[in-house]
Amino acid sequence: MMLWRAVLPSVCRAILWVVWMTAGIVVLAVSVEKADQGLDVVFAAVRFQVVAALVWLSPLILACGVCLSGLRRRSCGAEQALASSGIGWPQLTPIILMVGVSYGIAGLGVSEWVLPMVADSGLPGWIWAGAGPVRTADGLRVSLEAAGTLQYVDSIAVGEAFPRMASTSVLMASETVAASTELIARWARVLACVGWAWFGLIAGRFRYPLIVVVAASGVMLVIEAILWSMAAQAQIAPWVGGGIPAVLWLVPVIFCFRQSST
């Protein structure tokens, strides 16, 4: 219990610092991009982009936060003091796993209730919906079948156009491949939060752990986005494109353990 009291607050502070830094970068970028569109538009865009970034970049945030807390313990001598007491990364693992699970479940709740509320309700000119593209202005759907005819749909939902912004109930009601991919990806992201948080802990084996963590997690997020898009377009199986975040963290972890602990 004393170990939890000594380590957990510093880990949470480091993660919170990364959260604020991420939110600040998003606010600055969105404000500059939409500065000429009015205060209401800027506020709505900032609100959505900040929430989306904190959810979709949660593995990167956790990995960086845990790594920063480890660097802080190393710089102030706490890591050496813990090591002299026989406490290393195996003893710290339960704390980090608890933090990863908590953040992952919180992100799952935000994706379910908060993200659909702050999502921009504006739709693009055309969206891809089930049987073919739909023109959002009047609901005209172009059938992809050889003998298909033009039809009009009754309503168009933001969740159908952007599955990553829809609630679980909307995704479960939809029969599209993109909805199935997103359902799997949300649960996989929870496991990704746990795995990347743990990688942030054991990355101290590297000479420059923070650079390694940022580079590895950034590359894996790009791979995740590419595979999600491929699965949403039925180019690969949904369980592959959506579930890949649950196992991608194993690659840098295996490489990490091949490094000398000295």
Image (cartoon, rainbow, N blue to C red):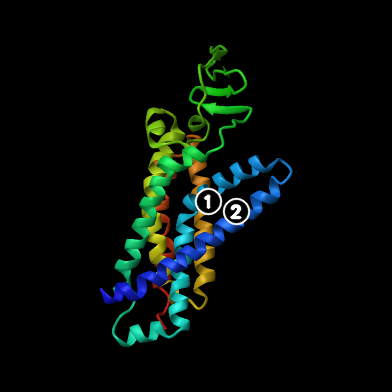
Give the x, y percent position of residue 120: 56, 37
Separation of disc 1 and disc 2 at Cα?
8 Å
19 or 87: nearer the viewer: 19
Q: Residues within 10 Å of mark 1 (few under 14, many from 20)?
A: some
| Residue at the farthest front position | 39
Which quadrant would residue 112 be assigned to in this image? top left
Image height of 27 relative to 241, above or below = below
Which quadrant would residue 257 be assigned to in this image? bottom left
* Residue at the spot 71% in from the left edge and 46% down from the top edge: 35
Q: How many marks?
A: 2
Indicate the quadrant containing the C terminus: top left, top right, bottom left or bottom right: bottom left
Could you tell me if residue 58 is visible in this image? yes
Q: Are marks 1 and 2 in contact (CB under 8 Å)?
A: yes
Image height of 17 relative to 179, above or below = below
Could you tell me if residue 90 is visible in this image? no
Could you tell which of marks 1 and 2 lies nearer the N-terminus?
2
Mark 1 belongs to which amino acid? Ala
Indicate the quadrant containing the N terminus: top left, top right, bottom left or bottom right: bottom left
* Residue at the spot 54% in from the left edge and 23% down from the top edge: 132
Give the x, y percent position of residue 162: 52, 35
**The disc label shown at residue 224, or none:** none
Say left or right for 176 vs 37. left
* Residue at the spot 48% in from the left edge and 71% down from the top edge: 68
* Secondary structure beneath label 2: helix
Q: Residues within 10 Å of mark 2 (few under 14, many from 20)?
A: many
Mark 2 belongs to which amino acid? Val
Q: Which residue is mark 1?
A: 53
Give the x, y percent position of residue 15: 46, 64
Q: Which residue is mark 2?
A: 26
| Residue at the farthest right position | 36
* Secondary structure beneath label 1: helix
